[in-house]
Image (cartoon, rainbow, N blue to C red):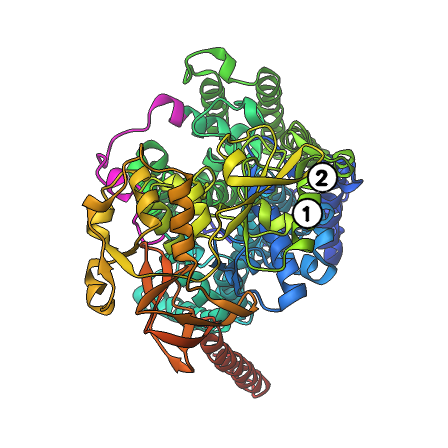
Amino acid sequence: MIPLKKKPQATKVAGPLPDTAAKPVTDFFDKIGKKAPLLALGLIFLICIIVFKDFLLFDKVYLFKDIGSDTLNFYYPYFYASADYLAKHGLPQWSFSYGMGQNTISSLFSDPFNIFFYIAGKNTIIYGMMYKELIKILMGGLLFFYYLKQLKLSDYTAIAGSLLYSFSGFMILGGAWYSFSMEAFELALLLLSFELLFTKGKWLLFPFAIFLIAVAQPFNLYVYGLFLATYVLLRLAQTGTLNIKSAGLIFSKMIGLGLLGLMLSAPVMMESIIQILESPRGNGSTSYAHILSSLPMFQTADKIQLGTSVMRFFSNDMLGNGNSFKGYQNYLEAPMFYCGLPCLLLMPQVFGFLQKKARVFFIAFLLLWVLPLIFPWFRYAFWLFAGDYFRGYSVIVAFVFMYYSLLALEMIVQKKKINLIVLIATVIILLILLNYPFFPDSDYVNSPVLAFVSFMLFVYGALLFFIGRPNSSVYLKYAFFLAVVLEITYLSNITVNERDAVLSSELSQKIGYNDYSLEAVNYINHNDHSFFRIDKTYGSSPAMHSSLNDGLVQGYRGTSGYSSFNQEYYIKYLQLMGASDKGNEQESRWATGLAYRPILESGNSVKYILAKKNINPLWQITCDQIATFGDVKVFRNKFVIPFGYTYDTYIKESIFDPLSAVQKDFISLRACVIKDADISKVAGLKEFQLKDTLPASVFNLGIFRQEVNDLSKDTLAISKFEETLITGNINVGDNKMMYLSIPYDAGWHLKVDGKEQDKLILDDGMTGIMLNKGPHTIEMAYHLRYFYKGLFVSLLGALLYLGLWLFMKKRKNNGITH
């Protein structure tokens, strides 16, 4: 468990009592035995009922309209669309509802617990979100309990630790952002699987932990891999087994078993990695790397950033709740270090129980993970300079404090010994930090939370002092445990319930995603069975931020999209056309699409526009208003060009790129944009000359109509249009380039007249097909690039997993343990 300065006592008794002493009170936690995990689970569940009562009873829905708008604008639409795709089409592949089209398989497994939604159906998601989070809290706490038991901690400490982990800031506050609670669950599973491997040689769970991390978010393989490497060295030092041989052996086992886990995850992991690498954010085309990496390495954090980090150790809400948060970044992006006040008091105590060699490693491990709070450059480096994030780093720091403090608690309770000077100094330092003027004014700090935390520090300090006395009563342990339960219940209740959540009563009203957009979309779909897109000039989500993924919930194809990893060529197209800023990383995620760009809408099959109050006067002459549903007006574009139209003229991308947005709109009606390197592939097309560009003052609806008619002469007659298969016929009067408003993707395979043909990138992002004069049959089919190849790897991994299990079982039966 922990190397001591002196040899520990073999028993857990409090120490010899005088003969005249009364019979000691039996310690409840010493006799609980195999029921300990049930008690831990029961206490976690009981606190969850108290904290999440309104959500569990469906008075509220676990979707947030405040700074947590991603729950409404990103997660819910993606979960809903994935469940809908599974029900209608099977395995999610390409979907035209994500932005202007994208491979969607990675969103299917972003949270493996969503399998409950996929089985039950998309309509269960809105109410089931809370129950899914409840399962993660319960399972995360239970896994952490078993992890602590592998460290040979007592049931008392393990149960207290499971409570602190289940209601840590990363689990509760981060759980309101869904993905972080999954990461906390994964960390607990990874820790347990490693300890089983390290202490007992049990390897079965380790590949599964790696598998789960890989399918949910492959990037976390790096995050948790880096952490685990340092943790392994700490554990080797702690157990007195740190040497080249032992380190090499355990790392070899981890690497081998980790590769096995990666093999099992191959189908989804490979597709997810490709999506990340081929997104603007993943490939660095719009990242902050050049800015963050150029900052001074040892530049200290400013007072507000440092103060936010300090205050977030005491409570999630020390600096305000939800939109009232006043610290660094915002309520969800700020550090989530809260892991219980006892951890702050107990953590320094651990060093007094360590041997000298182990103490050095404990100090080094602590500094390694805490110094980035003082020198942000190292935190940026941890994230490979991709952004100014805390995120997963938060749960690592919280774990370090929990690990140290729980080891200390175990020693204090068992040895009935505490360093009083360190305890008093710790209380004083914590109170100084609580009241230090990090911020411009006192309004930054939540006064009721500050008062509660200050009071609890004194309570814990007093309890630990008396617990650490030689003849301390077992009731002091109970009081300390009760204080932990009261603290995490009170503070978690603030974090969860003082938020602007969606009310269940709102779901039956014509607001949010249930607004009159649904009637408008249903009307359009009932009367028009061709391929078309719909643009909305408003967001239906009730969140504080406007939504861009409405089509995923309301069942239409649009041009806007919000995703951490938008399709690369979709964003490149928007950037070239001036609909998104090339240098703005945020705009690569929040892509507003083509709304208010009527010419580009016409060229990309935007046939309908839904609007409420913000009516564009131009629509009165370019569109027909065909229906009204409540406050939603439906417009049909009179200038839309059929899907799959042709150009006989091109313009080089190097010439097109620097033009104004207005010039680009006009030219898009007359020429397709070809990459300079592809000019040799468009023989027979004429080159557009800039001198032929119409000035804005000359352009009118008559010219617009003529250009649309010219582009519509030779178009694709679609015989089948599905999410992953498009077939049709076209007869071109001359050598022409067919433009398809499908973001270029290597997964699309093209056949012209039954023969494979390469696609071209048009307008830096869309798909082009060069056609010779005459009639042609066209077939485009989408195939996942690595999924089915990954299935073979996964099958091989499963066979290796089974074979290794049988081999180890045979060795065990033969009495071979090494």
Nearest the eye: 666 or 763: 666
Nearest the eye: 392 or 503: 503
- The mark found on residue 736 in the picture is none
Residue occupying the point 33% across, 44% down: 666
Residue 599: x, y in percent?
41, 44
Among numbered discs 2 and 1, the one appearing first in the sequence: 2
Residue occupying the point 66% across, 41% down: 517
Q: Secondary structure at mark 2?
A: strand
User: What kind of residue is marked 2?
Assistant: Val
Q: Residues within 10 Å of mark 2 (few under 14, many from 20)?
A: many
Provide the residue designation for mark 2: 61
Residue 374: x, y in percent?
33, 32
Taking the view exactly as shown, the residue that stands out farthest to the right is 57
Q: Secondary structure at mark 1?
A: helix
Residue 4 visible in the snapshot = no
Provide the residue designation for mark 1: 129
